[in-house]
Amino acid sequence: MVMEVSQVADQRYEIAHLKLVPKRHVGRMVAAAVVLALLAGLVRAFAMGQIEWNYVAEFLFAPAILQGLYNTLIMTFAAMALGIILGVLIAIMRISGNPVLSSIAVGYVWVFRGAPALLQLLLWFNLALIFPTIGIPGLFEFRTVDVMTPFVAAMLGLGISQGAYTSEVVRSGLLSVDSGQYEAARTIGMTQMKMLRRIVLPQAMRVMVPPIGNEVIGMVKLTSLASVIQYSEILHNAQIIYFANTRVLELLLVASFWYLVVVSVLSIGQHYIERYFGRGAKSIRATI
Amino acid sequence: MSNDILVKAVEVTKNFGSFRALDAASLEVKKGEVCCIIGPSGSGKSTFLRCINLLERMDGGAIWVNGELIGYRRDGDHLHEISDAEISRQRRRIGMVFQRFNLFPHMTALENIIEGPVQVLNEPMAEARDRAMALLDRVGLADKAGHYPSELSGGQQQRVAIARALGMRPDLILFDEPTSALDPELVQEVLDVMKDLASSGMTMIVVTHELGFARNVANTVAFMEAGKMEEVGPASQVLSMPKSTRTAEFIKAVHN
């Protein structure tokens, strides 16, 4: 019976031998063609434009540029280190049971997230206007202008405002750790500090690394603000050179090139850090 | 207090806001004894267990473990709350096994067991490692030492969690519904390890819905309801001939 039915109907259902014609993505092809044409135009404009590429090549490895690059890296590292230390501290204060510490943490984030980084840099740099000397009376005292060098002012301005952002990243990391982990750590007799260091932070890091990586990359470029207060980072040095030789765009391209190199290297580093802190965790890719 | 009493809880009371989770709950557990706490959900079983190792702070009553008052220091007619460091010290001797295992996911099975002995008891790494391997062998997981919790089944994770508790050389282990989060076919392997532990003389307080385990392994059974210890007695008596009608109703409901 079953055989008979399928024999009657078989003509219509035998399509396995037919040739398959894939759908043609006309829209995609048009869009790609337009974008490629625009890109070609852009490349041509730069090639034909009055850019002296030999200047770009000449200054790419100029000592002043490399020194600026070095200073940019140092500042990124210093400001970010300060930002992360403050961020962890403020986040722990925020979630602590102490209402005074918790309120101070909220206030810190409010104030330092509320003013532009450039303004904060200028505030620190000009601190001598209101406090001619700083120190603890009777113990030590310095003239503010001696202490508040461009480096220190930039590090404080960038690091302290970064701390406000990073504390929120750290806090979200701490909140992402299951309460059962805190309980298990307490149950084996860990003190608060040991629990944070050994159990909670390593797990929070998995959540914190991508946004902190983002912030480090942001900081590389944010350090260019320090050029305003005469810190000789790469953009500042590039400007000094083009003030002298008027090759503005060439030197800006040199600086762009180095920023791109640094950011690329950092992105690769972030990948490995994520892999380290992701140990033991199932890949999220499998669930999407 | 008699010498062989390991845990003595006297009229422990705990409120969550206006809800009275524990209402003058008292219990005694002797050294080497297994005590199962049964009862409907929300009756305060887990809260009672968590008061013993100070994961919850009680509002009234007192608990002694090994003759030591938990969470307070008595000074004449004053009770002083002890410091965080003192609390950590008291917790070291009280193991706990959770419903949801709570293994440290960033550490392998072996590292989970070593963590407490090395970081808290300051045991040398080599010694802690040897002991941890022996404990893994005891729970039948010697071949999983290098695996992360995410690579283990629920039953295997819970057995590692038991080994982690044992790593601290506890006087007492608290089990908070240790098989409730497991797939049915994985329950027995965990109960077997617990049974083995009981026969080795470990003092255990087990919050459980496994009445079969309670019948076979427990010395005493406590039935809790509405934050009170409704009935406490020898396992065979409470489970087979309960005096309280509420206990009888509960046991009947579970069996159906």
Image (cartoon, rainbow, N blue to C red):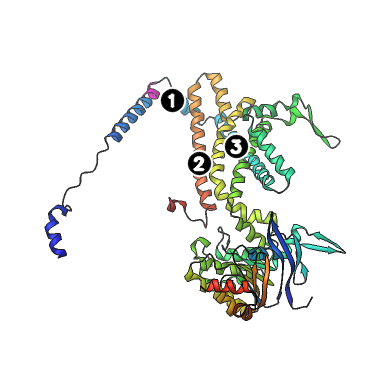
Q: Which mark is residue A53?
A: 1
| Cα–Cα span, label 2 and label 3 | 14 Å
User: Disc 3 or 1, which lies upstream in sequence?
Assistant: 1
* Residue B10 percent location from the top left of the image: 75, 69
User: Disc 2 or 1, which lies upstream in sequence?
Assistant: 1
Provide the chain ID for the residue under circle 1. Answer: A
Q: Amino acid at mark 3?
A: Thr
Which SS class for mark 2?
A: helix
Say yes or no: labels 3 and 1 on the same chain.
Answer: yes
Residue receiving disc 3: A76
Image quadrant assignment for residue B88: bottom right
Q: Nearer the viewer, residue B192 or B238?
A: B238
Asked if residue A45 is among those painted magenta in the image, a careful observer would answer: yes
| Cα–Cα span, label 2 and label 1 | 25 Å
Q: Amino acid at mark 2?
A: Val
Q: Is residue A274 above or below residue A24?
A: below
Say few, some or many: other residues with alpha carbon within 10 Å of mark 2 (under 14 / 14 to 19 / 20 or more): few
Provide the chain ID for the residue under circle 3. Answer: A
Residue receiving disc 2: A265
Extent of the magenta region: A44-48
Image quadrant assignment for residue A6: bottom left
Query: Can the viewer see residue B65 in this picture?
Result: yes
